[in-house]
Image: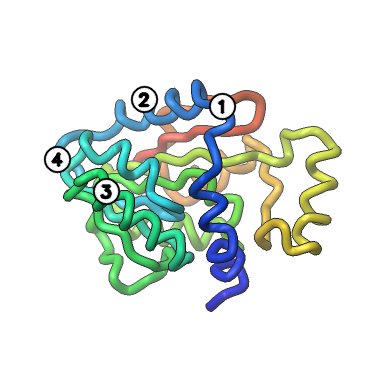
């Protein structure tokens, strides 16, 4: 088990109980995501956490596969799916490079609050591209720490050293994140800030 998996296992129960800090921004993220999904889509969510977002989007698509590196997060997500009677969502523990994720299988890949936690962004985006079908969509929202105030930027390394934040945490700026996605071969079709100034929503499409 990786250190990050251990971190999220430890915090899974607290994460599940935490409330969305900005419900209006979260609802906008859901609405804009749905605008780029269709009832025939097979969707992958990486870093699905305890499954809340996957379950909210389930009635907009044919099926969702939710993955997370934390077994405890996945256990909670599976319990939620059973409790809500949602049958077109499957949750299992996996990272982005798990061999059970078959190339060319997904119409859309969701990555909410996860790209900044991956060690190698270009490699991750290349893998995402291989998993998508032609014209498939990447729908992501990423905290761009490089756009936040200096106190937050200074606090994150301290929290990592104390074991209170996962590691690594990348300090993106919006332009740099867009550049990574474009260099991976995606066409960016929509962006937004939900909430502003640094929670950066991007929809990008395969050629």
Viewer-side label of 1, 2: 1
Which comes before the other along the chain, label 1 or label 2? Answer: 1
Which comes before the other along the chain, label 1 or label 3? Answer: 1
Nearer to us in this view, 110 or 49: 49
Q: Is residue 66 left or right of residue 174?
A: left
Instruction: Give how far across and how far down residue 112 sits, in percent.
Output: 48, 44
The alpha-carbon separation of the residues under discs 1 and 2 comes to 14 Å
Query: Which secondary structure lies at badge 4?
Result: loop
The alpha-carbon separation of the residues under discs 1 and 4 comes to 30 Å
**Residue behind mark 1:** 22
- Say whether marks 2 and 3 touch (CB < 8 Å): no
Nearer to us in this view, 121 or 112: 112
**Residue behind mark 3:** 83
Viewer-side label of 4, 2: 2
- Say whether marks 1 and 4 touch (CB < 8 Å): no
Look at 39% across and 61% down and name the residue there: 74
Query: Which secondary structure lies at badge 3?
Result: helix
Which comes before the other along the chain, label 2 or label 3? Answer: 2
């Amino acid at each position: 088990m990786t250190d990050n998996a251990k971190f999220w296992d430890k915090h899974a129960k607290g994460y599940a109980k935490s409330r969305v800090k900005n419900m209006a921004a979260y609802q906008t993220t859901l609405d804009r995501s749905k605008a780029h999904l269709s009832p025939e889509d097979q969707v992958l969510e990486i870093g699905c956490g305890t499954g809340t977002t996957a379950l909210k989007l389930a009635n907009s698509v044919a099926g969702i596969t939710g993955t997370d590196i934390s077994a405890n997060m996945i256990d909670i997500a599976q319990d939620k799916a059973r409790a809500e009677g949602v049958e077109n969502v499957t949750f299992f523990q996996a990272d982005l490079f798990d061999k059970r994720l078959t190339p060319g299988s997904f119409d859309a890949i969701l990555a909410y609050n996860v790209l900044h936690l991956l060690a190698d962004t270009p490699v991750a985006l290349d893998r995402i591209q291989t998993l998508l079908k032609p014209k498939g969509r990447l729908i992501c929202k990423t905290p761009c720490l490089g756009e936040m105030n200096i106190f937050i930027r200074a606090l994150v390394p301290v929290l990592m050293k104390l074991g209170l934040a996962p590691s690594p945490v990348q300090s993106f700026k919006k332009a740099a994140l867009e550049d990574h996605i474009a260099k991976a071969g995606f066409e960016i079709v929509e962006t937004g800030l939900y909430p502003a100034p640094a929670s950066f929503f991007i929809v990008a499409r395969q050629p």
